[in-house]
Image: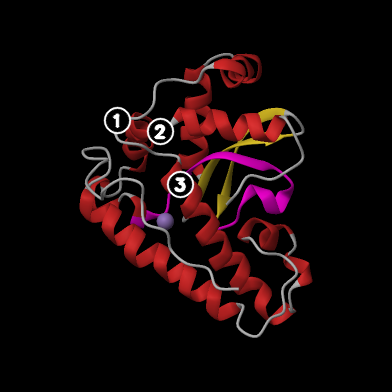
Amino acid sequence: MTFRLEALAYPYDALEPTIDARTMEVHHSKHHQAYVNNLNAALEGVELEVDDVAALLRNLEQLPESRRTAVRNHGGGHYNHELFWESMTPGGAATPTGRLAAAIEADFGSLEALQAAFNEAGAKQFGSGWAWLVLDNGRLAVESSANQDNPISRGRTPLLGNDVWEHAYYLKYQNRRGDYLQDWWQVVNWDVVARRYEAAVSGPQELSS
Ligand code: MN
């Protein structure tokens, strides 16, 4: 099996001014491409019973031990970035609606409270990593992960993730990770998050990566 980098659904400059075009280009065409290349290299010669990256991350122990760390890092990088690109859209997409909106109200009190918790998780993640909105046993929760680790390796379903590696924001925001976290909500595609939520609560089947 060979993984490949998909084109974005929008041009590199489409998320300006929240995320600048140069950051998007380097992030997608260099960083994400490298995760894909390194994942493929790590899987060379390995017989796999699974056919998607989410299943790989859920079943790392089934891989030869010598490949596990590379697949965790680069498979995580591939999965996380696909989810990240799909979570954004030019101009953002409204606010949460339907059952997701009700769940946010029930589990956080308000969208603003969710965003504050998410931003705090991202700001407090020491070094490189991610901030996440996840579904954990039917409840929404916010958490962070280091490096390219992903909530699915911990039995949770990721619904939304923001990349807090410096490569995601440094050209425009330099050391101001908090400003990046704050501004990022302007390009979040809540329609996609709502679809992930619906899929996660309506059945055991996993979302496509
Ligand atoms: Mn990244």
Horizontally, residue 105 falls left or right of residue 126, namely: right
User: Residue lying farthest bottom?
Assistant: 45
Name the kind of residue labelled 2 in the image: Val
Q: Residues within 10 Å of mark 3 (few under 14, many from 20)?
A: some
Residue 166: within the magenta? yes
Q: Mark 1 and 2 residues: CB-CB less than 8 Å, in contact? A: no
Secondary element at tag 1: loop
Mark 1 vs 2, N-terminal side: 1
Compared to residue 78, the image places residue 188 above or below, namely: above
User: Which image quarter: residue 18?
Assistant: top left
Relative height, residue 101 to residue 55 (above, below): above
Report if residue 2 is visible in the image. Answer: yes
The disc at residue 144 is: none
The residue at which mark 2 appears reads as: 188
Residue labelled with disc 3: 84
- The disc labelled 3 sits on which kind of residue? Phe
Residue marked by disc 1: 91
Q: 173 above or below 68?
A: above
Name the secondary structure under disc 2: loop
Residue pictured at 39% horizontal, 21% vertical: 94
Alpha carbon distance from label 1 to label 3? 15 Å
